[in-house]
Image (cartoon, rainbow, N blue to C red):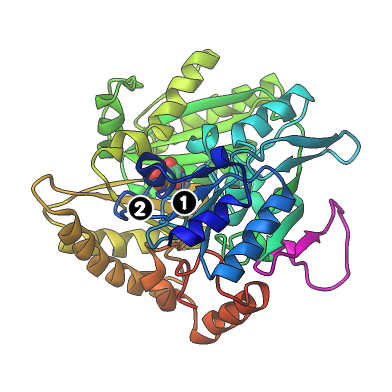
Amino acid sequence: MSDVLASLRQLLPPERVLTEPSDLEHYGRDWTRQYPPAPLAVALPESIEEVQALVRWAVEQNVALVPSGGRTGLSGGAVAMHGEVVVSMQRMHRILDFDPIDRTMTVEAGVVTETLQQEAREKGLYYPVDFGSRGSSQIGGNIATNAGGIKVIRYGLTRDWLAGVKVVTGTGEVLECNRGLVKNATGYDLRHLFAGSEGTLGLIVEATMRLTDPPRAPQVMVMAVPDMDSLMQAFAMFRERLPLTAFEFFTDKALAHVLAHGGKRPFDSEAPYYVLVEYETPDDATGEAALAAFEHGAEQGWLIDGVMAQSETQAAELWHLREGITESLAARTPYKNDVSVRVSRVPAFLADMQALFAREYPDFEVVWYGHIGDGNLHISVLRPEAMAMQDFVTECGRVTGMLCEVLQRHGGSISAEHGVGLLKKPYLDTIRTPSEIELMRQVKRVFDPHGILNPGKLFDA
Ligand code: MLT
Ligand code: ZN
């Protein structure tokens, strides 16, 4: 193995090939915690040419590469546990171009989401794909997972903002897809293959992202809701009456965890469910419409209590009640389910899923939250402290198999936005047909004929 390392060290300067145990541990894992990291080394390229050289070297040496962004993924897609070389994009973090007419920004893959958002704001524009891990996640990783988050209801997913992408394929070839064009009717749009490819088809090195107008005076409300039917009624009403930018939900258990980690209780009333509504207020009439909507919801019994942010600080505090959930649960190494159904199917699906979880998880704490306006629910199962990690994962895996059956009945997906990675790989064939999976395998072979790009993720090649 030392020959392999020696040849890797020929490609990059010594400070950009890491082999210290603490680095292998740090770069070998993502935000899923159940996979023990064990990469061979970590490479930190600074240019496309260096990425190409790494790929050619990997083909020659038959070493697997694990592309690595901010490693904020929740399905083990960026985990390296079998002697792979992690290719971290963190040194490729330049903003390459801004075009005010096209309203695009071209960036290297390692640019952090929040940096792109800030750069856009400085130009009077807005990059709308947003989520709690904005301060660490990188654009390349966002594309590779087709990241969604908290504004999808209004702005869609990462793929909807991807105007062009440059990748290095598994043969070391550089492929430039779509070049920022709005219209380009010249056959297969390969750019979209890379959105959600989880690093299995190529290393994303550059991307051209679209920008838009900033939201007009966003306003935030958090409200208490007595039951799921009321929640869906409230959603339909707010969507009809207000220019929504987010409609998020969480349960009393989720709120309790955030409050235990320093969150501020929004009001005295308690309820099983809470919603956070964000909407634009371009004029006074919209502000009044929001109040009228709240009053109507209260009269109907859909809303028990509510608070409207009176300042940016308070808006951030309210958002923290939803965005702080992941962090507040992290120490409990939750098993995460990230499921979706069509919005119209949410109530029926929820009833079946609640029954399943009540039956199968009577002794586990289950915390629900998510992007209910997109039909996307996160269900985090917390490990009882006395239970060994492996027993816990096995038990959760068993119930996930049953959850897949419920999802099949409702036409849903076992991964809405967290990807498949390692965590959901065993369930892919319950949601995708054998011919779909075989086609995906064939596509992988075309882009990665030597099987060196993130092998074992998504499916076994
Ligand atoms: C979220 O919506 O908070 C994220 O997808 C992360 C999570 O599920 O914990
Ligand atoms: Zn989410």
Q: Would you say 416 lies left or right of 443 here?
A: left
Nearest the viewer among 87 and 281 is 87
- Residue highlighted by disc 2: 37
- Determine the image quadrant of residue 357: bottom left
Spot occupied by residue 385 in the image (x, y as percentages of width and height): 12, 44
Can residue 302 be seen at all in this image of the molecule?
yes
- Residue highlighted by disc 1: 41
- Determine the image quadrant of residue 179: bottom right
Can residue 145 be seen at all in this image of the molecule?
no
Q: Would you say 367 lies left or right of 46 here?
A: left
Mark 1 Cα-neighbour bin, 10 Å: few <14, some 14–19, many ≥20: many
Q: Residue at x 60, y 31 (%)?
A: 114
Say which of marks 2 and 1 sits in front.
Answer: 1
Measured in 3D between alpha carbons, the distance from the residue under mark 2 to the one under mark 1, in whole angstroms, is 11 Å
Spot occupied by residue 438 in the image (x, y as percentages of width and height): 55, 84
Spot occupied by residue 79 in the image (x, y as percentages of width and height): 42, 55
User: What segment carries the magenta color?
Assistant: 170-192
Is 36 rendered above or below residue 398?
above
- Determine the secondary structure under disc 2: loop
Mark 2 Cα-neighbour bin, 10 Å: few <14, some 14–19, many ≥20: many
